[in-house]
């Protein structure tokens, strides 16, 4: 029997790691500017790229 929709435990772990990485790299600060909000969300979603050294700061004007 298959469970309904929702997010898997792997998805939750991925997002938690993303939040931690984004926080440590300084992407989760100053949420008053829309560009910073977009950078923060993007950093959480693509955290492996951030760990490889790609700088997302200034990506969104």
Image (tube, rainbow, N blue to C red):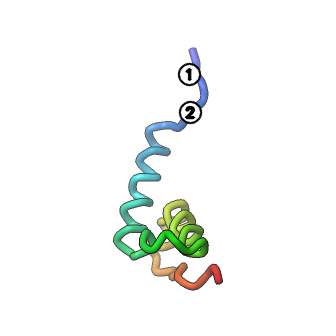
Residue 29: image quadrant is bottom left
Q: Give the residue furthest to the right.
A: 61
Q: Give the residue furthest to the front.
A: 32
Q: Is residue 30 above or below residue 2?
A: below
Residue occupying image coordinates x 56% and y 33%: 6
Mark 1 element type: loop
**Residue 56, position in %: x, y?**
54, 79
Q: Is residue 36 above or below residue 61?
A: above
Could you say which is closer to the camera, residue 46 or residue 40? 40
The tag on residue 34 is none
- The residue under label 2 is 6
Residue occupying image coordinates x 60% and y 71%: 34
Q: Quadrant of the C terminus?
A: bottom right
The Cα–Cα distance between marks 2 and 1, rounded to whole angstroms, is: 9 Å
Q: Quadrant of the N terminus?
A: top right
**Residue 50, position in %: x, y?**
48, 73
- The residue under label 1 is 3
Q: Is residue 13 above or below residue 43?
A: above
Residue 3: image quadrant is top right
Residue occupying image coordinates x 56% and y 74%: 33
């Amino acid at each position: 029997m298959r469970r309904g929709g929702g997010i898997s435990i792997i998805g939750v772990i991925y997002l938690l790691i993303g939040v931690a990485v984004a926080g440590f790299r300084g992407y989760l600060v100053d949420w008053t500017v829309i560009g910073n909000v977009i950078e923060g969300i993007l950093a959480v979603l693509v955290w492996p790229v951030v760990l490889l050294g790609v700088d997302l700061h200034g990506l969104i004007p």
